Image (cartoon, rainbow, N blue to C red):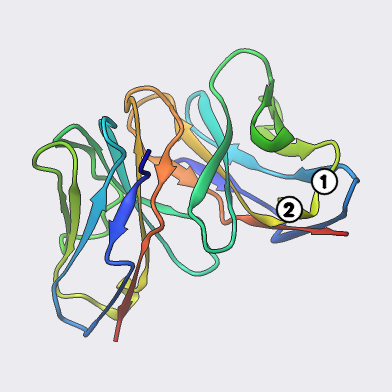
Amino acid sequence: GAGVSQTPSNKVTEKGKYVELRCDPISGHTALYWYRQSLGQGPEFLIYFQGTGAADDSGLPNDRFFAVRPEGSVSTLKIQRTERGDSAVYLCASSSIGGSPNEQFFGPGTRLTVL
Amino acid sequence: AQSVAQPEDQVNVAEGNPLTVKCTYSVSGNPYLFWYVQYPNRGLQFLLKYITGDNLVKGSYGFEAEFNKSQTSFHLKKPSALVSDSALYFCAVRDTTGGFKTIFGAGTRLFVKA
């Protein structure tokens, strides 16, 4: 079956602009995670959804970052007033049961470059 | 606070030899522990996890890992390395006391030489 997909694969924007990154999880997966990965680092947790609600948003770095999952499937990560330090690969992952520590299935990521 | 340390940026091993990729962790409660692998131009893939029970867990592609509570370690091992095992390996931990934040280490690049 289809895995986790993310669009766009690459996004180049200018400082101060608004961007949206999309994640399509595996069908039926109720848990969805967003991470960002900088060069030479491991993924950094941003936010976790169980269904439609954000159960843990403790990793969002500031109020410029926001994520939604209105119907419990597709999720969008939104970044306002982008800064050069936001440049990274943004990863999405989904898993079948969020409350249990099941394996996460990762998408290929969106590479965001802020000029 | 949760943390994960992978003390080696790179591990080099000859094909056919055993390999170990080290990981130590810090959590306030009991840990859930994971290993993921990232091949070039591919997404992160799950290898194995420790939740509870037997300290030695077996995973995909012949990998295994040993949970050592006293040393707060979860080292990844394989008895006989393959060139195709060359990739970037990440250890991750999640605290069982609440929350869903998964913390990843910085990664260890494994290079298996033929």
- Report x, y in % for residue A11: 28, 74
Q: Nearer the viewer, residue B72 or B53?
A: B53
On the rendered image, what quadrant is the N terminus of chain A found in?
A: top left
The answer to which image quadrant residue A100 occupies is top left
Q: Residues within 10 Å of mark 2 (few under 14, many from 20)?
A: few
Q: Which residue is mark 2?
A: B84
Q: Chain of mark 2?
A: B
For image coordinates 72% across by 44% down, the residue present is B22
In the image, A98 versus B97, the foreground residue is A98
Amino acid type assigned to the residue bearing label 1 in the image: Ala
Q: Secondary structure at mark 2?
A: helix
Which image quarter is the C terminus of chain A in? bottom left
Residue at the extreme front: A1
Q: x, y (%) of residue A45?
A: 37, 49
Q: Which mark is residue B81?
A: 1
**Residue B6 coordinates in the image, percent (x, y):** 65, 50
